[in-house]
Amino acid sequence: MQFPLRTLVSLALLSLVPACLAADMAPLKVGEIASLTGKEAAFGQSSHKGTLLAIEELNAAGGVLGRTFDLVTEDNQSKAGESATAARKLISRDHVSALLGEVASSRSLEIAPIAQSSKIPMISPSSTNPKVTAVGSYIFRVCFIDPFQGTVMAKFAKNELHLNKVAVLTSVSSAYSVGLAKYFKERFIADGGDIAIEQKYSEGDKDFRSQLTAIKAAGVGGIFVPGYYTEAALVAKQARELGITVPLFGGDGWEAPQLIEIGGSALEDTYYSTHYSPEDSSPAVQGFVKRFQARFNGETPDAMAALGYDSAVFLADAIKRAGTVESAAVRAALAATKDFTGVTGHTNIDANRNATKAAVIVTIKDGRFKFLKTVAP
Amino acid sequence: MTEFLQQLLNALSLGAIYALIALGYTMVYGVLRFINFAHSDVFMVGAVAGCLIGKHLPIGTWWGGLACLLGAMVVCALLGMVIERLAYRPLRASPRLNVLITAIGVSLLLEYTFQNEHVFGAAPRAFPQVFPQVVWQLGGLTLSSNQLLVIGVALVLMVALQFVVFRTKIGTAMRAVALNPRAAQLVGINPDIVVSFTFALGSALAGAGGILYALNYQSVEPLMGVMPGLKAFVAAVIGGIGNIPGAALGGLLIGTIETFVGGSQLSTYKDAIAFALLILILLFRPTGLLGRRTVEKV
């Protein structure tokens, strides 16, 4: 049997028609870069689950502008350099309309210049270093920034823990840690406190005994450890082993179940500032906790999960207001966000594309995270 | 003064671990004249094996801790022999460079195999406290049983190694092969057995080092061997590669420098300073602190 050429051509043309119609309604691709494996896997996993839940809920509700979302996730293995590769791949190969990520400021700083030069809106769920959004007009975040977090912890150490002389143990290879330490020191000294000693380490270090021994000799009332949970847990453990019993405190980088898993009982009498607490009784938080637990086998969402969720909802909100997926319009809508209500509270976007919102202070008691108080901006 | 003594204790326990790993590098070099870069990953496998074995043992008992330590050493000894049999022996007649590149390949293979979710996974895991843990206060000095254990176990293993190498038949055979492989073969020594034994011995020490390191720093992950391995390699070179007491001395030296620089205002530069020292020592003593000048046979 033979098909005449004309039939073949018209059949081919016909088959193109639905494809043309579908192009407008095809799922909207959104790229996500997360540390799903490696040192900060706990952050990436939490954040990813939050984002995934948000995308699934948005799609179940019919998406925005009649289009559903297609989340394309790339893992950067918590390694330097991988995020830039992932961002280039998502933009040039997958043609994503927006980028969500990263948790760590150092890695967000790798993605930001690429997103900016390609004019793709980027929303970091939880990078708190101010430099991230300073990269350009397309870079946003849904969390508070380090000057605020550093100030909150400095005031907390001075007024609530009644400390006058503290030590700071900073990770020099992390933009987040260096920034947080700087703002903490500025505020603590301005309030009349004394930074007796500052010691440093690098990401991936496991031995902090030499730094801690020097800190112990300086006789301080508390130690500020603005690092991530892997190091913070080891610092706590080694500090207690060396007989340092003073309170330790840090920032949102501490928040992960692995902190307690590795640190154990060494973490009693430690505090950190973060974005949200699942113990918060507001209906938005409790509803989110329920839905998250139903989706992920009863797992309780942490701050990274809540921010990951908010970052996707924040993007969808802006696209809805923009009425188009065209990147300049979405960017303008993101920048104009006022009083956006997410799981992590009311968010306003300021002129520097940063979010202004409240912080939460959490303490660790009997091997569990306990909500202490909320601090307004 | 208390601070100095405390730092010295920290230095000794860190140095002892470097020394244990360095011994493996130096022994393999002594016998085969090449650097086994996969050695640092054998160290990691030791910690991983300990982590998995430790899960089935009660926490905080002496017999449980020793079982975990011995188990990891046996696993590593077997792994060392398998690596040598499969990757290095087929290349024994080829140029040294080929074996060196193969060693790097084996190292990467181990690292990435263990990063696979189904093997171990890339995320750090907490190491179970298999040995009993006590902390003593002595004046202002804090003595942790973990740190003393590291120093003690390292000492015992080094004395045992010295005994094996200088007082046993197989040790004599090892030294003979190191001195002249051809001549050793002529007097009836099977070099394959000697090389296998050397790898088993060195790998077992690395395994013990892995357990002690994990016990002290409480977290285990597939890339944990990279930095300690590199520093132990430096320690072996500083001590004079191929020289067993040299490796121990080099390990202690690197551990001490790292700890004291780490406790000063220059803490960021502790690794840089340790490696700069390597360059300095090699400038003035190209064969290392205890190394002997040998004429390279052509």
Image (cartoon, coloured by chain):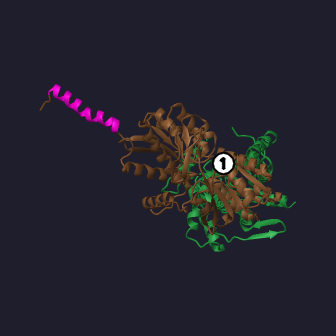
Along the viewing direction, whichever of B2 and A113 lies nearer the viewer: A113
View extreme (right): residue: B1
Q: Chain of mark 1?
A: A
Question: Seen in the image, is B293 located left or right of residue A336?
Answer: right
Magenta segment: A4-25
Along the viewing direction, whichever of A338 and A236 lies nearer the viewer: A338
Magenta span main SS: helix
View extreme (top): residue: A6
> Where is residue A183 shown, x and y percent of the image?
71, 47
Chain shown brown: that is A
Residue A290 in sight: yes
> Where is residue A322 shown, x and y percent of the image?
44, 37
Residue A292 vs B241, above or below: the answer is below
Question: Seen in the image, is B77 located left or right of residue B250?
Answer: left
Q: Which residue is mark 1?
A: A148
Question: Seen in the image, is B102 located left or right of residue B236?
Answer: left
Task: Say whether residue A12 is magenta.
Answer: yes
> Where is residue B264 shown, x and y percent of the image?
81, 50
Quadrant of residue A351 in the image? top right
**Residue, x 51% and y 54% (percent of image)?**
A343
Chain shown green: that is B
Quadrant of residue A29 in the image? top left
Residue A22 vs A190, above or below: the answer is above
Mark 1: amino acid: Phe
**Residue, x 42% and y 36% (percent of image)?**
A325
